[in-house]
Image (cartoon, grey):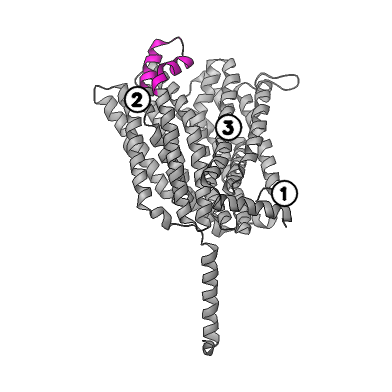
Amino acid sequence: MPSPTQNARLQARHTQLVQGPILRSLITLAVPLILANVLQAAYQLIDAFWVGRLGGTAVAAVSVSFPIMFLTISLGIGFAVAGSTLIAQYFGAGEHDSVNHIAAQTILMIVLISVVLGIIGYILTPVFLDALGVAPDVYDGALGFMRVSFIGLTFNFAFFMFQSILRGVGEVKIPVYIVLGTVILNFGLDPLFIYGWGPIPANGVAGAAIATVGTQSIAAIIGITILLKGKYHVRLHIHDLAPDWKYVKRAFFLGFPASIEQSARALGLTVMTFLITSFGTVSMAAYGVGSNILQVVMIPAMGLAMATATLVGQNIGAGNMERAAKIARLATWIGFAALEIFGIIVFFTARYLVAFFVPNDPAVIQSGGIFLRIMALSWGFIGVQFCLSGVFRASGNMVLTMMLTLISQWVLQFPVAYVLSKHTALAITGIWWSVPIANGIMGIVTILIYMKGDWKKKRLIEPAQAKEEALLAETYQEVMVDDPART
């Protein structure tokens, strides 16, 4: 049982998130989430730093592995989103026993899914590499890197689920500390396993994956231990780990659209890369630099969207629909303003930013600068889409967010990019223009859907008051049947 101190802290956290100042709550949640996203990105940068010293084939081995691993992880992310959404609503409703049960069931489900995906991925890695047409000098490195990554998939998923669970109850600082520690550790372990030292053999490209899996396993063990101790508003109980097939079925159908959404994004990036490649190395390099800068922009947008989803979900669970709407509006304005200001800065400094990454290639600087200037002023609409999609997810509208992503990627951006680049005089700039066109249209569509208000009508759980009224009504009916004279 929780101690009086833990109960007091739990009640204070609950009160802050469903009754406290909205702006303060948003900032309290968003800042640690943004930092966690930055640190997660540092894993890739550290691997790139050390692997890059092995040569071009080693870098290619990691690069060719990324789309497959990203697609695999995307399949699991959706189910974590489902668990986090349910946890946020139950926490907002004050039903802490349900929070504990859902946390245990979601971890059980995500571990089982990761084991299956890991085994399938490990076995089919050669098939993936053959399908991608990987060069012989890259093949061995990619094979080792991918297979080690698939072995560690369970730890990766487990820690991601730990982050999602704590985010659902509004506790976002602890994962930041854990990720910070493992990133520092990964920086030290990478050269050790890549180049070898003493009794540890040199593993080459696979060594980077070994180091990452090692640090992620430590993070996962720490996370599960924290949940077992129940110090941060969620406690795993052994009896809750027995499969609850009713919940598993519900979470699967809730999480599956989110998995499709994430997978569609991954596939969309791959298809767009093929289209850009047809315009030559300079265009591909310009796209690469522009995409890296765009990824930096996406980090605060994703952090704010996660914070919005958590806060909106908890208030929906508490039955505070008007407060949830106020949160959605404030977060959307913040997202739009912050990303638009950043876009204006990038618009006027585009060539300098590209030159920072490729200082000795005027052609790439020219093309990359054009790409950034064309898309930068539409970044405010990315903030709008992310925040309002977080609102839709928080209410359980996973199918809606999936459809918005599919339309954005496959109905708008890619077809527009293909037509403008292949069938007009715009050529490569036609691809660049597809980004702001898709952002602008989808931003407006998302706003209109939000304003229609249907998201307010969907709720994954019943508020506690409604449950009490239903129970009283049921009891009354039973009394009437047993003794009609008591009216």
Question: Which element carries disc 3, helix, strand or loop?
Answer: helix
Relative vertical location of residue 222 with respect to residue 188 in this rendering, above or below: below
The circle drawn on residue 229 is: 1
Residue found 63% across the figure and 34% down from its top: 179
Give residue 469's position: percent from left, percent from top: 52, 70
Name the N-terminal-most of marks 3 and 2: 3
* Identity, as a three-letter code, of the amino acid under mark 1: Lys
Residue identified by numbered label 3: 40
* Identity, as a three-letter code, of the amino acid under mark 2: Ile
Distance between mark 1 and mark 2 Cα atoms: 51 Å
- Categorize mark 1 by other alpha carbons within 10 Å: few (<14), some (14-19), many (20+): few
Distance between mark 3 and mark 2 Cα atoms: 29 Å
Give residue 41's position: percent from left, percent from top: 55, 29
* Identity, as a three-letter code, of the amino acid under mark 3: Gln
Relative vertical location of residue 387 with respect to residue 352 in this rendering, above or below: below
Q: Which residues are magenta?
A: 347-371
The circle drawn on residue 374 is: 2
Relative vertical location of residue 327 with respect to residue 471 in this rendering, above or below: above
